[in-house]
Image (cartoon, grey):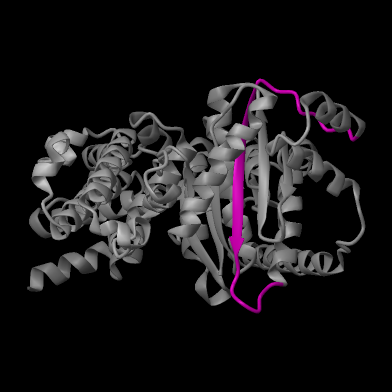
Amino acid sequence: MLKVLMVDDEVVVRSAVRNNIDWEAHDFVFCGEAADGEMALSLIQEVKPDILITDIRMPFLDGLELSKIVRGTMPWIKIIILSGHDEFEYAKSAISVGVEEYLLKPIDSADMLEILKKTATRIQKEKEERMKVSLLKNKLIISETEKKSKIIYDLIYAKKGMKEILARANDLDIDLIAKYYVVLAAEFTVPENEFIQYTVIESIVEDFVNSCGDVRYSFLGNDRVVFVLLGNSFAELDDRVFEFAQALKYEVERHTCALTTIGVGKIVTRLSEVAKSFASADKARKIMMEQGMHHINTADEIALSEMETLIAKGSLADQLKYATMSDVQSIFEKSVKIDGPEAHSLLFCYYVVVDLYLGCARLINSFGGNPENVLPGMKGIQNINKVIQSQEDFKSYAMDMLIRTVEFKESQQRDKSFPIIKKAKEYIEQYYGDANISLHIVAKQVHLSPNHFSMVFSQKTGTTFIEYLTKVRMQQAKEQIEKSLKSLNQIAEEVGYSDANYFSYTFKKYEGITPSEYRKKCASQ
């Protein structure tokens, strides 16, 4: 079903569109509404509708400005403009920003439904056309796109000098000059026997990048692609990279059966440092893939550890980076070769434990911990000959050290965003009654950009910001209906809804019955 979002400052118009169309019967979902363009922006980022219906004249941010922003950041969204003005200039402006339809008020529900169906047909045709174009591509022809891709490949792997890369880029009219750079490393996972999906993904990526400014990219095989985003402001690029990543993931996953994993690198200031940004992005991608996580994450957020070699020529260190508790026993046995002949020497055991302790300590430090707190009882490592008297002592001591270290690492990985989520939830639970609370406002409270916060919140809680806010509001509304004699209009206002009709609509969608029916149900019990 296609998702439809409505933006209009007139309550009557929103109610008419919302209530006079049987959405599900026509394969649509009415996924939300807003009273002005400014409030709509965060909602659009959250629910990512397929179709946006917006009034042309609204306070704060009008429909034309909203349409320009949406077309620039989420170009797949089809826009239907509503207007009470049958004027050429309005229609001309609407066409210039790429809206699909221009509908005059007052709105007839039959006319609206007809336009929605036409738009849905257009969306379906675009999907079919994209598939046709994808299947017709000839990958054997060396194209200008592939030459451009090779420049980015050489840049991220530092294969050539900057002078040569810039000269080749200049020949192909590729602008690589900017104040800031950041790299994304994406990987697409499709089911077996669905490899044709990779051709579709390639077409989607090309179309998507062409709709965005200051992005260069290179495919690394069928299933991987690297993007280099350019920007002139650190703050702007920091926000845009997460907006880009979320929109790309959504676009690929809505058109294909692929799962998308995206690692986000560090922002750098020199073209020669792009390779470093790629390295951190690619490490984040690798770790998420090994853990079966199809998310968007930075190297910092999953706390990449740069441990040095411990024992067995580094194999233990490499495996501990990604180990879970279930892996510890097998990793230990393979890495230190406890069944080998050298393991029968207590001197060898002492060497292994000391080396192991130093490695675990470095890992703990890299996660912001104190080895003395994480490994209590291990401070006597200098007296190891008194602690380990047998092979069993060695195994027990070493395994305990590994288990404590991996437990600490996992807890830090889980809890890295915990303070952010906790603070955000506390703010929502305190200010849910404010009708103006939005994703942007809460993001500011936790010192993240809106797109970064939206991604972290949804990935860590399993629900979007709007869904969580609605849940809190509905729970409070139910409690007030059950325990007070306040009017439903008053309750609606107190839980953050200035429009009682929309409150009733949302309540029924959440609870299955209207607030009035819920009150009667409570009274009869």
Left/right placement of residue 230 relative to residue 41 reads: right
Question: Where's residue 77, x and y in %?
Answer: 64, 53
Which residue occupies 40% across, 40% down? 305
The vertical placement of 230 against 281, above or below, is above
Residue 372 occupies quadrant = top left
Question: Where's residue 44, x and y in %?
Answer: 52, 47
Say which of 1 and 311 sits in front: 311
What is the number of callouts on the image? 0
Say which of 310 and 133 sits in front: 310
Quadrant where the image shows the N terminus: bottom right
The vertical placement of 515 against 427, above or below, is below
Left/right placement of residue 27 relative to residue 378 reads: right
Which residue occupies 10% across, 41% down? 377
The vertical placement of 422 against 323, above or below, is above
Magenta residues (range): 172-195
Residue 51 appears in the picture as rendered? no
State yes or no: residue 187 in magenta. yes
Left/right placement of residue 342 relative to residue 84 reads: left
State yes or no: residue 185 in magenta. yes
Question: Where's residue 215, x and y in %?
Answer: 71, 38
Quadrant where the image shows the C terminus: bottom left
Residue 243 appears in the picture as rendered? yes
Say which of 272 and 311 sits in front: 311
Residue 234 occupies quadrant = top right
The vertical placement of 471 against 215, above or below, is below
Which residue occupies 17% across, 59% down? 391
Which residue occupies 34% across, 39% down? 435
Question: Where's residue 409, x and y in %?
Answer: 29, 46
